Amino acid sequence: MLIHTVRRGDTVTSIARETGVPPTRIITDNLLGEPGRLAVGQDLLIQYPTVTHTVAGGDTLTAIAARYGVSRLAILRNNPVLDGSDRIYPGQILNIVYEPPEYGDAVTMGYAYPFIDRTVLRRTLPYLTYLSIFSTGLRPDASLIPPEFEEEFIDLARAYAAEPLLTLTSLTEGGTFSSELVAEIFASPALTERLADNLAEAVVRAGYGGVDSDFEYIPPAYAAAYADFLALLSERLPEGVPVFVSLAPKVRADQSGLLYEGHNYPLLGAAADGALLMTYEWGYTFGPPMAVAPLGEVRRVVDYAVSEIEPQKLLLGLPNYGYDWALPYVPGQSRAESLGNVAAVNRAADRGAEIRFDERAASPFYTYFDRPETYEDAVEHVVWFENARSVRDKLLLGAEYGLGGFGVWNVMRYFPALWTLINRMFRIRKFV
């Protein structure tokens, strides 16, 4: 596998000629919706399967998998164009086998809201060890507010050998997040016990495969209580049902700020079975233009995390989005537009912008001008997002530190390079 960065004048046909890969494979492996429209600087994954299969009349995905001694899920992962379905047609060429992954096993976790496009979800689930269903909220009496379509999501996850996780947040019935509510519960031993019992009951009743606790902005006075709660929850859950915790991206133990002080890495790492490092949002909606997850900043977080928590317990957070800022940036006024990584490339192609790669941040970016009625009204924009090279560098970082895997925020938009690279570089753990 190689990453081809589109040069001026490149076409799918010329890239195919240069790399020795059929144009149809480049199109399907990268899910190119408009193959004739490439952006200069765009990354394309060029793959070389060792075994392919041309579908014949009467073939089924299950029969093809059995013929080659591979799993149906492996074929779905190797062919994202199938959209996670068994629908195939005569003459279709399927990628069956690639060279073995170089970096061993990895756990994958992805977050999904109830309104996710079901085709996107089905296409993603073959790559997931855990589906974090976002989210189960809280009431002041420690009772739970389940997400919409809970049963559907759990059934879908299991259909693809992924474990559904109950994702616990401080989302209230009013639809807002409340750190004060979490503090009130932790201040009361009775409410803390009730919450643990309610979660254990919900896991058993609905058939969840685990709990992912995503409490943020916890007052520092309750840092130890939060860890104690996770330990209590682990005791209350059936044996073998894991507890995960999402961690603010700290770089040292005494890091100040409400986002960080309530997350005590050694205590939470000891109490939970796994921990997601939320290594993203350096570039964010209201902040100045910059990479969402600069590699150097991500490394600093990992450096600290592995000093406090066993590396195999840690999942490296990967952002599945970028931002578009109008310039000039005005603190307190500017608001960046969030957009998917595929949409970012399409916007570059639409505006004729050249995508560049910032080596220090290990992230792609580009600038463009919008299309106003008059030249005087033109506004310059800068877009930072993720591409194949930036994802590869983060995956290599996880492998370098021996981390247990990766967590993706979020899986609402399908990003072909992300899942293809994880699939090719690691053996994804599945519950089969």
Image (cartoon, rainbow, N blue to C red):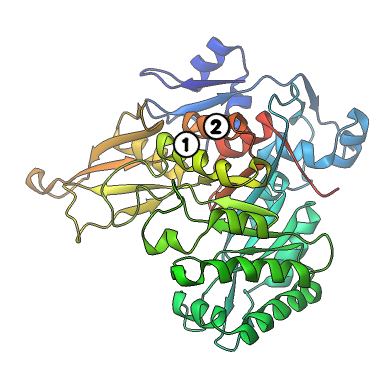
Q: Position of residue 270 (x, y in %)?
A: 66, 56
Whole-angstrom CA distance, mark 2 to mark 1, is: 7 Å
Which amino acid type corresponds to the residue marked 2 in the rendered image? Leu
Residue under label 2: 397
Quarter of the image with the N terminus is top right
Q: In this orientation, does residue 114 appear? A: no
Q: Determine contact: label 2, label 1, CB under 8 Å.
A: yes
Which amino acid type corresponds to the residue marked 1 in the rendered image? Arg
Left or right: where 25 falls relative to 159: left
Left or right: where 48 falls relative to 33: right
Q: In this orientation, does residue 421 appear? A: yes
Q: Judge by depth and name the residue closer to the eye, 117 or 223.
A: 223
Q: Which mark is residue 230?
A: none
Quarter occupied by residue 45: top right
Q: Position of residue 325 (x, y in %)?
A: 27, 48
Mark nearer the N terminus (2 vs 1): 1
Disc 1 packing (10 Å; few <14; some 14–19; many ≥20): some
| Residue lying at the far bottom of the rendered structure | 141
Q: Residue shown at 76%/24% (left/top)?
A: 100
Q: Residue shown at 50%/47% (left/top)?
A: 320
Total marks shown come to 2
Above or below, 178 relative to 152: below
Residue under label 1: 299
Quarter occupied by residue 245: bottom right
Q: Secondary structure at mark 1?
A: helix
Q: Judge by depth and name the residue closer to the eye, 384 or 73.
A: 384
